[in-house]
């Protein structure tokens, strides 16, 4: 490889590190896929996705099948009872097209949030920075914005600054008029939602509930907290595990929270993490990711896993 | 037929990040990269059981969509001006940024070839299949792109820096 070729490889590797995270990617794909299938009247795809969701939601059972008097208590104080945790999306649509039956899937970060109404193919997003949607200038609720409905079959987007520091985008595969009706009907009323996978114990500080979907709950760091990110995911039978980090991976069998599986210790450039992959009934697995250190030790991991409630 | 053991959901969970990185390397626009990957996955989803090589399919969809997106957004695309300081090269961020600006000015097919060659590490035959052209065309795109980079001041500085 010549110098210029090596330079290209280096610059691509560096730029790739800036790539956006894949959090929420699957739910966005599901939303878009549902839109497409609906527009083509391929009901089978909808049924398949509904079935996956139904299996994932299922009847709620306690991990391990037994309860412990002190299951949601931590004598060290590092972890605190988190059973009532919920996340909040600040906007509620006063109008949605007929067919909207279920609560939205939420991805809520500090400066960005997304509510996906899967059954009607409507996304509502807010952010502290402009959306980047370019199109035709328009007004939404008397405020200037951008309308983008590029071609039949593509999503229609309306984007505008709703209040100082809050930019909102409404995206749907509906008509411009319907999309506008949803946008103009947004109210400053929060949607409060509890996760399907409940992390009964969580570090006392520094974690923010970010993502709620039927088979994954994610907490990200907030206020410089080092005890997060923490994520818990349920993998279905035959579903492969995520690839682990690139370097210094140590894997061993382990019993954690009363369940058997394996514990992977991995390290990136800055920090060390744990990933526990534990057997659940019916071939499912529980995948738990936490930092190492910053309050996390083997005992805390054990308590944390014991307090997880999975659907 | 695709391996039945891998569900679409598992594939997205396992490979989504890698596809996002490729898309981002192509366009260096977070929103556009997410759109490219989402569109590619939506295309593969209904035919998941019939796709032999989902990575190749998704990669092809991303690149083809990138080329069309480039056409649609060429007038509005802005090259951003910050790079992470984690690159292994001894060259400073200013030179890398200058190099990236040069890359951004190359014809889109040349950019796609470079990204697939030097980021995704595909050989020319695989790139040719992906882009639907001959290997000679792939080599021609790569050769012209590298010559243009090498001829620039920033390219020369970058090469000099990596040789230090």
Image (cartoon, coloured by chain):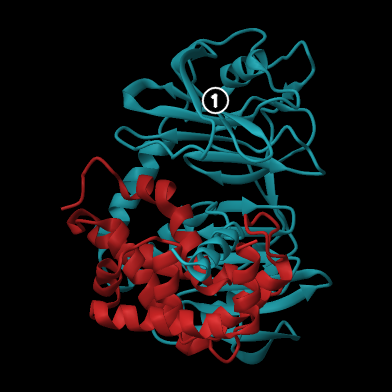
Chain colours: A cyan, B red
B1 and A105: which is toward the camera: B1
Q: Secondary structure at mark 1?
A: strand
Q: Residue at 39% x, 85% y: name it.
A: A152
Residue A202 against residue A108 in the figure, above or below: above
**B9 or B88: which is nearer to us?**
B88
The quarter of the picture where residue A193 lies is top right
Question: How many labels, in total?
Answer: 1
What residue sits 46% from the left and 78% below the top? B111
Chain letter behind tag 1: A
For the C terminus of chain B, the quadrant is bottom right
- Tell me which corner region of the image, top left, top right, bottom left or bottom right, holds residue B89: bottom right
In the picture as drawn, the residue positioned furthest to the left comes out as B1
Left or right: where does residue B139 sit relative to residue B78?
left
Image spot of residue B133 (x, y percent): 25, 81
Few, some or many residues within 10 Å of mark 1 (<14, 14–19, 20+): some
Image spot of residue A227 (x, y percent): 73, 32
Front position in the image: A172 or B159: B159
Residue B150 drawn at (x, y percent): 54, 80
Compared to A190, does A219 lie above or below?
above
Quadrant of the rendered image containing residue B5 = top left
Residue at the extreme top of the image, as rendered: A69
Name the residue that disc number 1 marks.
Answer: A309
Whether residue B135 appears in this view of the structure is yes
Q: Please give left or right for residue A178 compared with residue A220 in the image.
A: left
User: Percent x, y for residue B135?
Assistant: 25, 77
- Who's the residue at 62% across and 80% down the image? B101
Q: From this viewpoint, is residue A35 visible?
A: no
Residue that lies at the very extreme toward the front in this rendered image: B164
Q: Residue at x 57, y 16 (%)?
A: A306
């Amino acid at each position: 490889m010549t110098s210029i070729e090596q330079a290209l490889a280096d610059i691509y590797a560096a730029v790739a590190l800036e790539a956006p995270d894949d959090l929420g990617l699957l739910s966005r794909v599901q939303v878009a896929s549902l839109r497409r299938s609906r527009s083509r009247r391929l009901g089978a795809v909808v049924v398949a996705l509904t079935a996956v969701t139904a299996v994932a939601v299922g009847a709620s059972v306690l991990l391990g099948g037994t309860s412990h008097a002190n299951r949601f208590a931590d004598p060290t104080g590092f972890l605190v009872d988190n059973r009532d945790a919920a996340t909040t999306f600040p906007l509620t649509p006063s109008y949605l097209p007929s067919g909207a039956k279920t609560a939205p899937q939420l991805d809520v970060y500090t400066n960005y949030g997304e509510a996906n109404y899967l059954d009607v193919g409507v996304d509502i997003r807010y952010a502290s920075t402009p959306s980047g949607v370019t199109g035709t200038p328009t007004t939404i609720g008397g405020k200037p914005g951008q309308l983008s409905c590029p071609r039949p079959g593509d999503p229609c987007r309306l984007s505008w600054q709703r209040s100082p520091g809050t930019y909102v985008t409404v995206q749907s595969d509906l008509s411009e008029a319907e999309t506008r009706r949803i946008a103009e009907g947004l109210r400053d009323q929060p949607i409060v939602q509890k996760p399907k996978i409940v992390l009964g114990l969580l570090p006392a500080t520094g974690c923010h509930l970010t993502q709620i979907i039927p088979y994954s709950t994610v907490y990200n760091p907030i206020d410089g907290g080092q005890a997060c990110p923490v994520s818990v995911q349920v993998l279905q039978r035959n579903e492969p595990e995520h690839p682990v980090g690139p370097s210094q991976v140590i894997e061993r069998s382990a019993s954690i929270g009363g369940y058997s599986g394996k514990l992977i210790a991995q390290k990136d450039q800055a920090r060390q993490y744990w990933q526990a992959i534990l057997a659940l009934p019916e071939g499912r697995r529980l995948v738990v990711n936490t930092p190492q250190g910053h309050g996390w030790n083997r005992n805390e991991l054990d308590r944390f896993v014991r307090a997880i409630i999975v659907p | 037929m695709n391996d039945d053991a891998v569900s679409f959901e598992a594939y997205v969970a396992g490979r989504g990040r890698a596809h996002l990185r490729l898309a981002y390397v192509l366009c260096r626009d977070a929103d556009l990269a997410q759109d490219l990957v989402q569109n590619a996955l939506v295309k593969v989803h209904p035919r998941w059981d019939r796709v032999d090589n989902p990575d190749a399919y998704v990669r092809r969809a991303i690149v083809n969509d990138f080329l069309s997106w480039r056409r649609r957004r060429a007038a509005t695309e802005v090259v951003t001006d910050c790079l992470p300081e984690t690159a292994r090269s001894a060259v400073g961020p200013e030179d890398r940024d200058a190099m990236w600006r040069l890359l951004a000015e190359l014809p889109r097919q040349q950019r796609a070839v470079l990204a697939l060659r030097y980021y995704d590490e595909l050989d020319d035959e695989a790139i040719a299949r992906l882009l639907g052209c001959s290997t000679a065309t792939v080599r021609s795109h790569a050769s012209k792109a590298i010559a243009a980079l090498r001829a620039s001041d920033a390219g020369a500085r970058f090469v000099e820096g990596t040789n230090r």
